Image: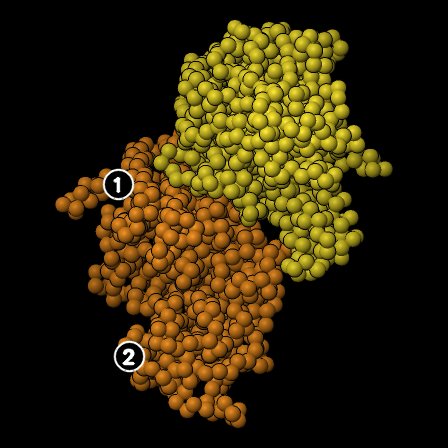
Chain colours: A orange, B yellow
């Protein structure tokens, strides 16, 4: 019955806004797609990964110049830099970081890490000190103490330790990578009193086929025993550490001091070091204390993991030595344009960062090289066909993404008003990780166009084509089908984008529709070589994209064709019905489950439950309204401009700078970054935060802030979403 | 030398963007202006002032219906209501409010006010209980205590009392109207511990030609002895008391409880009553204590004013009885349209409120009647000439302005995104007060068009025409010439708009250019009959607009022609150069004076002074840039659309929702409402607030928040303005 109801509802959703400004769409499309050349991508990738290029270094400045020149040579217009002054973090090349096991009494060293990963492909990886193991924004200094193993370093892991009576106060906490952003792990460890943190890559995550060298890089994509994941420890969505909410322009004035940033725990005070599993073995295998067998904390080594504290040899302790410094550096974003012929002030934006922890052939080189090829292909297509896109296409190469989305966030903060005014969509590629399947994070209003585009791109994997899956879409749907979109069972899973790359500011700060896409292996949450020394072009050439860079080419084709669709379709392909559908059947359905349950337990929540009912009814109204609009647009092309001008601002309705007075950088009522994991998105976080407060309150109605106060707070939070939905409905009224 | 420099600078500022979409501009203009009919205004005014119509009453609902019908009959399109649920305040018609002088011991009454003003023009003023004397949002209840006279009730007045050893704690504070908004007076009195407040109209303000009946109403515009000023005591720029920052839509959820509103001092807890000077005489003449001769506290009565506390007869005390209630009511704004032919999504908005404290023939009836006539004249002109404005003209009639700008603020909160997107300018008339001179509050970018328009409207005063001043501009310039615009010595004074009427939300919350204009007497800050029973049509017909409503007609002509200019000029007449000029020579010059002085005294302010220098240099850059743009627009009409689309969003650059974390409703970096007087505007208040903190800090560099912290705070506040100016410059870049 429920299914039948769905079918009836879904039958109304027609969505093929197929008309383009370009009368020769089919030709333009095919020329553009065919112009993407895998070997040119490879050539660019070689150039930009010739040496390590961390943000703020002369090497990275050279990469920026290379990109700008490539873009200019390709024929982009107005290629220029946008500079900011950012507080970055560096290791000391002359003094590598070390972890040692020493005798507590004598100081004698039993074991000491070298602090540098072994070079495996010498002709690509031999730049002196490229192999140094470090983490940006670690505290500077030395700490000595007993080790405690804290699994993934999540809240539940620290709670588990507490429960079994293990305190991490003044301990050296050993945490494995995975499940959440490393900065969140360290922030929690510091909160629980840790003296230092060791972050290591466990074989369970990075060497699932075994740690024997024959199973790991360079023989596979799995991490070799000496590899470490570098990365940033900054926790905040404000871009530059010292200038949250304002642009870090030259001659500006910081809104925070470094001391204030420490106090707000944006960066840790304690030293933090990354270890390979080869090194971590020496520590983990010697831990004493409780076994982890009753809990999900056993990793990939073939011994029983223990929590500690301390070693089997109770005289041994750990020493962590980190040399880390903060430096203000000039960073440079690069922008370039193809001006639109019809709507030059409507921008379709393509972006990728170019700074890297080491050589960065995957992250971000794969994306950077593809973006340059997309630029070249667009201009070449224009030359071959006399076509020019109707809307402006803007190309962005971001700096200092790795330190914490700094280049793109400062840009978004500086040009907030102009971007809010002009940006239609933002299309991000951070990297191409593997050859498994296309994968995308995006928001519901873009679903239809993303799927449509994936259906016109040829499958880059010949085996897949032979299996009958001829398009990128086919493998994608096979790999990530979850039927999570009730009315569109043919849509693969598309998660909400979070803070894993530069789309974050565009969506969460300004309310611009965004997509972040890649090719990846479905069974990984992160690729094993992530942020390691081994991200050089060898990985692509000889491991995962061996067929003339077909995977990279395919991502380039998708990127170009998606941009062309947004730039050239007479009706901007953003669909409110699919959003309304998700709001109703997904976001609100989930919230209702939680709130109505709570309301049964707490009579003070009657207002909240009532307000949620009102919001649900409003989402029905939106759904009805958007269906009518779809029909209108479907049947009458003369409303195209009317619709387009309205629809591309719809997402702005959910930007509310007052939704979280304590966290003013949280501005999107629907989509924000999880506090617990910056890599994950949270839906209506300002609502769920109150839900958590209620769940954790021992007595809701006797709290000192008055009976029912939490219920009132929840009702208010829900009402804010209601006002956002109300705004979307108003957006389509001909008059206010 | 300085003058010569100015002349050279000013010579570059050419600004006659004279081309219109309409090829027959001259004809359209003259037909439109001639279509405004004074007698029709009078007729409408009679209809809408037939009975008292306080917001939220059935009488006011009838007025709303009348206006909507007038607009529909005139031919406006899409006339409809926008409803909100607002917390309003009412007196009790069956229990008028009283002030008595009683014997402390026996309770015997020596004197008691009637609580109602005498009816003077019976055929206009005889609705039962129309004459009740009350103040909206007064506390409910009775208070007994000794009187203290606190002059105008400003901070300095309470400080003066403190200085001479008089406490107002638990006293009944007697305050005269004038100099600042009544709500600010009461808030301060409550803060200093007053038990109740009496607000009275002093002859010095309202009967300057003497209190003898021959000198006052109905023989002049001066207040008669029994007249009182009603009004609201709400202090906040958030519209409805319970829903700051969100719209008070039906089915929404309040963000404050009434108790929280009291705690935040948005409304007072203590009873407050308005008195006529006839009644106040009985109290003031009997006060004991210090004379006020050494201070500006002597009012218009012919006895020496004393502060108290208490009466000459020390057995006497004052009793204040107030019956006041809060009620949630549905309020209704009315909107109507003339759709633009070329740019239908660009709105030129005309607005005025229609709710009144009593009959409201001046405030707001004069404006309401004129607005209906402007609507009629526009449609008639379209019928006569086949012309249609290029941009959309939107007409708004606001409800519950008198309770505290509620209708317009809720509207602005609900449609923030759409208004920010579509509104070109907002043109407000609250009322027409007298026949002295045209007078306007507006922002610099509108100066040129406002002056140009005033020059084409015929002077409504025949004596002035005979004296050679043939236009509205001529008398205006003669009356309010202050040479306050360095490059434009021909501009009369135009103050920055504050919260005296409905333009506030448009400017301060969304950053829409606004003007509020009127006819007034230059020697008054407020007209004597303000908010009294005597605001009936008699005041216009027989006192100040006796020549067939020539003054009202003239305001209508100005309003219509200004709207036509904004709706029809190919280049939207908003000028950034004049703004940049004011920023440099006025706002920043003043701030430099203050900050550089302070910096000489406090070495911690070196950063602030430096940041101000940077901002000043940036304002030079803006000035140079805007001059180049002016030239471009001047010489090449093909850039008209390019310029227009950019310039009408310029003011949005100064909206920063994070500028005052403690006061999130303060969002405009340049223009805000003075905390001390809601009727006055403050420039860069977030900067001057820190300046005050520094001035009041006894030791800037030893404060507990660390050495130089206030200097850092000031530099940060200045930098926010810098980012706003930076945004204006960016706004005109062809690419980001």
Q: Residue at x 57, y 47 (%)?
A: B660
* Closer to us: B146 or B75: B146
Q: Is residue A734 left or right of residue B153?
A: left
Foreground residue, B388 or B265?
B265
Q: Name the chain letter of the residue that bears numbered label 2.
A: A
Q: Secondary structure at mark 2?
A: loop
Which residue lies most toward the left here?
A: A1
Q: Quadrant of the C terminus of chain A?
A: top left
Q: Are there few (<14), some (14-19), or many (20+) residues within 10 Å of tag 2?
A: few
The percent position of residue A435, horizontal first and vertical second, equals: 33, 67
Q: Residue B710, relative to residue A364: is it above or below?
A: above
The label shown at residue A14 is 1
Residue A732 visible in rendering: no
Asked if marks 1 and 2 touch (Cβ < 8 Å), the reply is: no
Q: Is residue A259 visible?
A: yes
Q: Residue furthest right?
A: B1
Q: CA distance from mark 1 to mark 2?
A: 53 Å
Q: Earlier in the sequence, mark 1 or mark 2?
A: 1
Q: Position of residue A686 (x, y in %)?
A: 41, 51
Q: Quadrant of residue B566?
A: top right
Give the residue at x 49% y 31%: B140
Nearer the observer, B444 or B151: B151
At 36% across and 51% down in the image, what residue appears?
A: A701
Q: Which residue is mark 2?
A: A293
């Amino acid at each position: 019955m429920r299914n039948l109801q769905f079918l009836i509802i879904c039958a109304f959703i027609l969505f093929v806004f197929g008309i383009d400004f370009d009368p020769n769409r089919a030709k333009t499309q095919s020329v553009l797609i065919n112009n993407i050349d895998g070997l040119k991508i490879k050539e660019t990738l070689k150039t930009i990964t010739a040496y390590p290029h961390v943000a703020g270094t002369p090497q990275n400045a050279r990469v920026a110049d290379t990109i700008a020149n490539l873009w200019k040579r390709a024929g982009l217009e107005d290629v220029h830099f946008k500079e900011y002054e950012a507080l970055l973090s560096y290791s000391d090349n002359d003094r590598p970081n070390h972890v040692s096991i020493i005798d507590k009494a004598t100081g004698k060293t039993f074991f000491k890490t070298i602090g540098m990963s072994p070079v495996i492909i010498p002709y690509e990886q031999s730049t002196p000190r490229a192999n140094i193991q470090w983490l940006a924004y670690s505290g500077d200094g030395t700490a000595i103490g007993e080790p405690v193993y804290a699994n993934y370093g999540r809240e539940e892991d620290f709670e588990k330790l507490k429960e079994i009576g293990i305190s991490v106060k003044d301990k050296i906490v050993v945490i494995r990578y995975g499940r959440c952003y490393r900065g969140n792990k360290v922030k929690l460890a510091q909160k629980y009193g840790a003296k230092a943190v060791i972050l290591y890559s466990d074989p369970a995550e990075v060497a699932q086929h075994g740690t024997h060298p024959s199973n790991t890089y360079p023989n596979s994509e799995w991490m070799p025993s000496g590899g470490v994941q570098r990365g940033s420890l900054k926790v905040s969505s404000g871009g530059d550490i010292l200038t949250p909410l304002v642009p870090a322009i030259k001659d500006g004035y910081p809104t925070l001091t470094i001391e204030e940033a420490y106090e707000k725990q944006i960066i840790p005070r304690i030293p933090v070091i990354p270890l390979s599993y080869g090194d971590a073995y020496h520590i983990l295998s010697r831990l004493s204390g409780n076994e982890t067998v009753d809990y999900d904390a056993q990793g990939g080594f073939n011994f029983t993991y223990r929590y500690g504290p301390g070693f089997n040899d109770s005289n041994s302790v750990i020493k962590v030595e980190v040399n880390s410094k903060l430096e203000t550096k000039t960073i440079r974003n690069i922008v370039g344009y193809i001006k639109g012929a019809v709507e030059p002030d409507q921008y379709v934006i393509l972006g990728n960062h170019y700074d890297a922890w080491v050589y960065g052939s995957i992250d971000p080189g794969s994306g950077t090289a593809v973006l340059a090829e997309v630029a070249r292909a667009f201009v070449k297509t224009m030359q071959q066909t006399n076509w020019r896109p109707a809307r402006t296409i803007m190309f962005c190469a971001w700096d200092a993404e790795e330190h914490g989305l700094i280049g793109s966030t400062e840009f978004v903060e500086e040009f907030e008003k102009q971007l809010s005014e002009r940006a239609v969509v933002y299309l991000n590629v951070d990297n191409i990780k593997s050859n498994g399947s296309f994968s995308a994070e995006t928001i519901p209003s873009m679903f239809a166009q993303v799927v449509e585009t994936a259906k016109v791109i040829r499958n880059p994997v010949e085996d897949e084509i032979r299996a009958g899956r001829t398009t990128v879409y086919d493998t994608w749907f096979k790999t990530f089908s979850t039927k999570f979109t009730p009315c569109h069972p043919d849509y693969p899973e598309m998660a909400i984008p979070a803070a894993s790359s530069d789309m974050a500011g565009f969506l969460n700060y300004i309310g611009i529709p965004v997509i972040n896409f890649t090719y990846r292996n479905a069974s990984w949450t992160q690729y094993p070589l992530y942020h390691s020394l081994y991200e050089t072009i060898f990985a692509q050439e000889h491991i995962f994209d061996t067929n003339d860079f077909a995977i990279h080419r395919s991502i380039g084709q998708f990127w170009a064709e998606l941009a062309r669709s947004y730039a050239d379709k007479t009706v901007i392909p953003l669909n409110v019905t699919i959003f309304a559908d998700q709001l109703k059947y997904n976001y609100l359905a989930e919230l209702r489950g939680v709130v109505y349950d709570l309301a049964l337990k707490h009579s003070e929540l009657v207002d909240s439950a009532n307000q949620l009912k009102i919001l649900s009814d409003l989402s029905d109204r939106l759904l009805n309204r958007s269906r009518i609009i779809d029909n209108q647009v479907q049947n009458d092309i003369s409303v195209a401009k009317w619709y387009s001008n309205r629809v591309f601002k719809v997402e702005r309705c959910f930007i509310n700078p007052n939704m979280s007075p304590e966290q003013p950088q949280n501005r999107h009522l629907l989509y924000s970054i999880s506090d617990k994991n910056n890599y994950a998105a949270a839906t209506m976080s300002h609502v769920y935060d109150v839900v958590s407060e209620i769940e954790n309150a021992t007595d809701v109605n006797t709290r000192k802030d008055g009976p029912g106060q939490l219920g009132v707070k929840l009702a208010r939070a829900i009402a804010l979403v209601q006002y956002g939905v109300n705004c979307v409905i108003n957006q389509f009224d001909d008059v206010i």
